[in-house]
Image: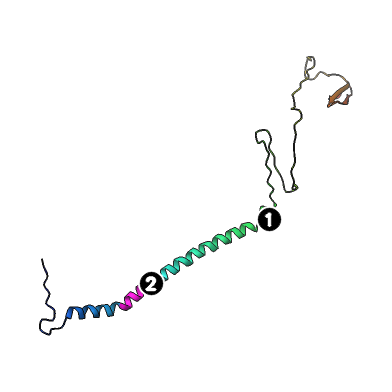
Amino acid sequence: MSVSQISGLVSGLDTKSLIDAMVAARSGPVVNLQRRQAEKTAELTAWQSFDAVLLSLKIETERLGNRNLWNQLLVTPSDEDHLSVTADNTATLGSLDLFVRQLATSHQVQSDAYGSTDELVGSGTFSLTINSVQQDLTVAAGST
């Protein structure tokens, strides 16, 4: 369906242009308010972002104020498969080298069988030698 317009038929005035101009003049404050609203929304978003950054800064500064954070020592072994290390708050700063000269071996000694667990083993002196150092242990008769 086509729409016909007759503008200024009798008066000769372009009434459509006049009406459009009046509507535009009246809508000017609305457009200004919409523009200001968009600016204020952008400003609010910027302040909210700034607030989030400040909150993050506050959390991190509180964490930095924790004395335990500054008193921690990091200890790292060069071979975690064969050595584990820890440090407490009395550890001093520095570097330590640990050299393994010889691996430990197990050793077991067995005596003769006894008739019961209440039977006395006897008395005497036992000698233990560790790293070429002899240590004597004397056991008196009747000791348990």
Please tell me which residue lies in front, 101 or 107: 101
Q: Position of residue 130 (x, y in %)?
A: 83, 26
Which badge, 1 or 2, comes first in the chain's sequence?
A: 2
As for residue 102 lying within the magenta part, the answer is: no
Question: Residue type at mark 1?
Answer: Arg
**Image-based side of 120 in relation to 59, left or right:** right
Which of the 4 image quarters holds residue 129?
top right
Q: Residues in magenta? A: 28-36
Q: What secondary structure is the stretch in magenta mostly built from? A: helix
Dot in front, 1 or 2: 2
Q: Position of residue 101 (x, y in %)?
A: 76, 30
Q: Position of residue 138 (x, y in %)?
A: 89, 25
**Image-based side of 74 in relation to 50, left or right:** right
Q: Quadrant of the N terminus?
A: bottom left
Instruction: Provide the residue designation for mark 2.
Output: 37
Instruction: Provide the residue designation for mark 1.
Output: 67
Question: Residue type at mark 2?
Answer: Gln
Mark 2: which secondary structure?
helix
Vertically, is 118 above or below 29? above
How packed is label 1: few (under 14 Cα within 10 Å), some, or many (20 or more)? few
